[in-house]
Image (cartoon, grey):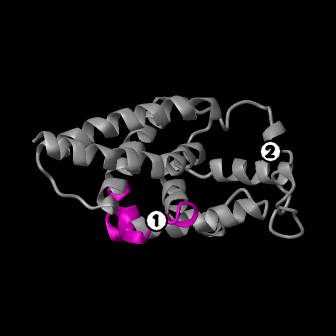
Amino acid sequence: MGEKTESRLPELREIVKEQDRRVYNFCEYMLYDPSLVAPLVINIFAEFGKVYRRLESQAADLSDAELRIRLFQVAWTFIQRHLAAQEHNLHLGRDTRDLKDFGRDLLSGANVDDQSVRDQIFQRILSLDADLRAPVVLRDILKFDDEQTMQILGMRWGVYRHRLNRGRLDFANFLRGRLASSSTTEATA
């Protein structure tokens, strides 16, 4: 039993070492306040360590891909809890300074190397609803495949594809400087 612990713990360290940046990026794209990302990532890895030790004590034989999925499932659970606890005042009040540059089309003629353009792109990613943003971030930015993304988010295929496609459409519209997606405006017209 002691030998098994010695052989499995380096794998845990390797997984943490390989995935720390991806977990950080996932949290960064999902949370509104960047100062909360680092403490949340620490809590995610602490909880994943407990999950890993429980799997190890059950003598579960999981591949690296399955362990990565478990890690991101833990991250998604923490992110959902955090977002549910937050109060969002995005549409309240008369302060529209955040929307001042929203009409700017970032897809035509914008220089992605410019820091202000990168900040605007990041803000527009954050303007997506979290349920639509998570599949887009995991699939398109962090490069998980469809099956892994479905497992991480705990969704069925149809729900996942709908949210991924709707998130992509809304994000493209946000990059073009439109506040509402064309499917939403057609449905209300």
- Assign a secondary structure to mark 1: loop
Percent x, y of residue 11: 32, 50
Q: What's the residue at 31%, 37% (across, down)?
A: 49
Percent x, y of residue 144: 46, 65
Amino acid marked by disc 2: Leu
In the visual, does 29 lie left or right of 109? left
- Assign a secondary structure to mark 2: helix
For the N terminus, the image quarter is: top left
Local crowd at mark 2 within 10 Å, few (<14), some, or many (≥20)? few
| Residue wearing tag 1 | 144
Q: Is residue 33 visible?
A: no
| Residue 130 lies in the magenta stretch | no
Report which quarter residue 9 is drawn in: top left
Along the viewing direction, whichever of 8 and 85 lies nearer the viewer: 8
Q: Which mark is residue 85?
A: none
CA gap between label 1 and label 2 equals: 32 Å
Stretch of the chain drawn in magenta: 139-159
| Residue 140 lies in the magenta stretch | yes
Along the viewing direction, whichever of 30 and 92 lies nearer the viewer: 30
- Determine the main secondary structure of the stretch shown in magenta: helix
| Residue wearing tag 2 | 99
Q: What's the residue at 84%, 49% (across, down)?
A: 115
In the visual, does 71 lie left or right of 180? left
